[in-house]
Amino acid sequence: MLYQRSSQLFAEAEKVIPGGVNSPVRAFKSVGGTPIFVKEAKGAYLYDEDGNRLIDYINSWGPMILGHAYAPVVDAVIEKAKLGTSFGMPTEIETKIAELAVSMVPNIDKIRFVNSGTEACMSAIRLARGYTDREKIIKFKGCYHGHSDSFLISAGSGAVTFGSPNSPGVTQGTAKDTLLAVYNDLTNVRSVFEANKAEVAAIIVEPVAGNMGCVPPQKGFLEGLRALCDEFGALLIFDEVMTGFRLARGGAQELFGVNADLVTFGKVIGGGLPVGAFAGRREIMDYLAPVGPVYQAGTLSGNPLAMAAGLTMLQEIEKDNELFTRLDEKTAYLEKGLRQVLEECEIAYTINRVGSMISVFFDERAVVDFDTAGYGNNDTFKKFFHGLLAEGVYIAPSSYETWFITDALTYEDLDYTINAVRKIFS
Ligand code: HOZ
């Protein structure tokens, strides 16, 4: 496949945009080569500026659960745009999507819309701090909750991909209030609580980690976090930016049967437009301004185009009883095929999967936390990435990212992908 035009566009972009990209992982720095510039996308496929078609396993890092340019969402956005694109005033559609989200997700009474997952997580911890009158938070090494200062401490995703899990620019004053714990290690979490008695406002956790590759919670881990939060008087925040409306209608809370105090959303809830949200029980959410003292705001929050896309997406998910089963079956089929091929080819690997989130790590050791996730950051991954790209299959350009499966993928696409892996390693 040729990427001449993409290379040219990247060279032009580098002159005026730092690193040529507006979000670091896109730059291909950890796998080498030139990023692909997308011209358009439809269903399960990306079409780049050189005229190549790629089967897409990222799906805008999660939102395109029903495929790119999904007609009902596109139509809803077009119709809404004709009526004006932003007012900075309340609109009826905000209440409609809020009602629907509250009805789909267990254990939440109220939801506030923002513009990104970063904003949602940043606002959720401010609310947790205000509500508990405590300052510290516990976050897990390798979890990524967006690029707000408090979270860029041992962060996953692009931060670790580019070697700065603790970013310069985050002050020591901020960093000292973020306590680190080890994912899937309840003994460690307890010791962090014990050392900071009555100081911890909240634990924030990705209930299925998706920013150090896909790392599922081990049996009892989320339940254990719930119990520790109750014991030490802290709130439990599930960052469901990736898992929300993807693993189940009600996200990880529904899938694992564990209640969080606050939940953050992004990606699917916006149907591909910039939407984030945070939600929780009434008494916590009413601590927000204008009813309560914790301030949070935004001109584009609840933007009509974003709400139209999000509402349509949630309505489509709500009415499709088989969606999550289909997604699980497709991803299980992919997992099975990949396992067969990698075994045939005698490649050391570990595959982690929960529903339609899946990662391949090229190491035979179990990946359960940040340290073990590092095993997969190796040359075999680079060979895999570029091999797939040459065959017209696009996965995330970093071993620290998860693949997000879309319902638009056909079994032919999955077979094609499995065979492409066979070609790479035979
Ligand atoms: N932080 C995102 C992956 N976990 C990447 C966002 C992007 O580059 O669009």
Image: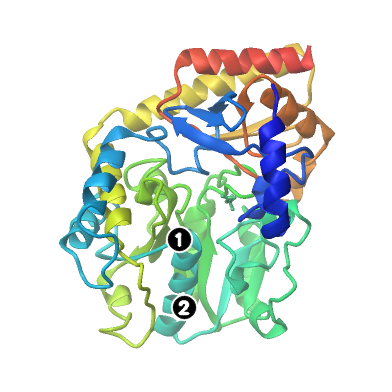
The residue depicted at 29 percent of the width and 27 percent of the height is 322
Quadrant of the frame with the C terminus: top right
Q: Position of residue 358 (x, y in %)?
A: 57, 34
Q: Is residue 402 left or right of residue 15?
A: left
* Amino acid tagged 1: Ser
SS type, badge 2 = helix
Return the residue at label 1.
116
Q: How far apart are labels 2 and 1 at the CA level? A: 16 Å
Question: Of the numbered discs in the image, which one, if any, rests on residue 126?
Answer: 2
Answer with the quarter of the image where residue 378 lies.
top right
Instruction: Evaluate if marks 2 and 1 touch, with contact meaning CB atoms under 8 Å apart.
Output: no
Please identify the residue farthest to the right as the structure is shown: 379
Quadrant of the frame with the N terminus: top right
Specify whether residue 349 is in view: no
The residue closer to the viewer here, 191 or 288, is 288
The residue depicted at 38 percent of the width and 25 percent of the height is 326
Q: Position of residue 383 (x, y in %)?
A: 79, 28
Front disc: 2 or 1: 1
Q: Is residue 129 above or below residue 313?
A: below
Answer with the quarter of the image where residue 137 lies.
bottom right
The residue depicted at 52 percent of the width and 65 percent of the height is 204
SS type, badge 1 = loop
Q: Position of residue 152 (x, y in %)?
A: 65, 67
Q: Is residue 182 above or below residue 4?
A: below
- Mark 2 and mark 1 lie on one chain; the one further toward the N terminus is 1
Q: Is residue 285 left or right of residue 400?
A: left
The residue depicted at 25 percent of the width and 40 percent of the height is 75
